[in-house]
Amino acid sequence: MDNNLELRAATSDDLRDLGELISRAFLDDLDDEFLKVFELVDEPERARVITGDGRIVANGSILTRDLTVPGAVIPAAHVTGVAVAPTHRRRGLLNQIMTAIFDDIIERGNEPIAALWASEGAIYGRYGYGRASWQVGYKIAVRETTLPGVTPSGRLRQAKPADVRDQLASVYERARVLRPGISGRPGHWWEYHTADLKVWRRGMSELRAVLYEVDGEAEGYATWRVKGGWDDTGPKGEVAVGEVMAETVEAYAALWRFLLSIDLVRTVKYSFAAPDEPLTHLVTNPQGMATWVEPGLWIRVVDIAAALSARRYAAPIDVVLDVADQRVPANAGRWRLTGGADSATCEPTTDAPDLSLDIRELGAVYLGGTSLTTLADAGLVTAHSPAALAAASVAFGWHKQPLSIEVF
């Protein structure tokens, strides 16, 4: 056993060692082309590593990005790259890394929430993360269902994503504010997302893009890859859709109509649909869409007053929450939340609680995709006032289900 383990901030010199650790932890090999592109968005000063005998044996990183939440866009610490070498498991290294990440967020003071994707969901609940969204996947048999109609006044234009990066970014920024859970892409993030590395293709084509434009202005786009194939009955091509972002209903329908009508394709797959995705109501036969559901984004409320004041609410709310938080003691206690569609405040109080819950459950409801009533029915929220539970469940909801369209 190493007796010289050291917790420290990472530096730019650690990039390759970190890449090796994380790749192996996720059962993959480090790709040099990926490492070069990732360097565009890497923030070594926000990574915390543990070293032993000169090697990095544990890591947890933060990406400085914002996140769409109900009624607002706020800073959110995007936690990523959490890994412990298999030779150093069961030694408390993960706990040290997660504590160091909390310390970094709290010291900065401008990120009221943290967000992550959980490769193993059983891990992060104990650190106060709640599962805040679901991802829906589709496998669409295009011979069994289609999207009727014709493309309206706009036009469709195909392009290489890197060649229309500015147009994609413009649509993305306008469209993402319409749905909670979508991350901002500052700085070099669009270079990263349009890099189209060979390791990302996994046997499919280069990344392709199509834009829906009206009077020369893009109102939506989709990205996808394709893989050709034939069998005894003819073509069996497959499309893997990456992103569909649209700011108008016309753009949304036109893009999906295009994706479901590509020649020689028999199957279209999409892994980042929302639970309330409009597509299911547009196709002629929803049974032609095989569907699966899996956990999406996990949210950790780090500063309860700032977080609950930052988002907006679907109905007027005035509720006292009694919150337990073993990791961030400043969150523990009673808080009065008042607000609605235009503003909100959250302040400490000594009033009797209406609801009692752990910080994990507060994270689960934060994006509006999980109901307080559902958590109460699961025994995870205690309602001292049934009327308050019903009112708060409505207020914490939102008119669109949350969705995260990228794994970070």
Image: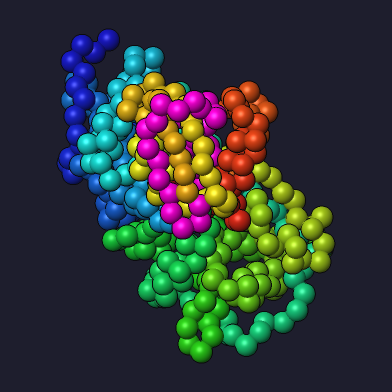
In the foreground, 342 or 98: 342
In the foreground, 73 or 181: 73
Would residue 152 appear left or right of 61 to someone viewing this image?
right
Image coordinates for residue 194, horizontal then vertical, percent? 40, 64
Residue 229 lies, with reference to residue 211, above or below; the image says above
Image coordinates for residue 30, horizontal then vertical, percent? 36, 42
The magenta region covers 340-368
Furthest-front residue in this view: 351
Image point 59% across, 25% down: which residue? 384
* Residue 167 seen: yes
Image point 22% across, 36% down: which residue? 107
* Residue 79 included in the magenta stretch of the image: no
Residue 111 lies, with reference to residue 351, above or below; the image says below
In the foreground, 326 or 154: 326
In the foreground, 164 or 276: 276
Image point 31% across, 32% down: which residue? 102
* Residue 366 included in the magenta stretch of the image: yes
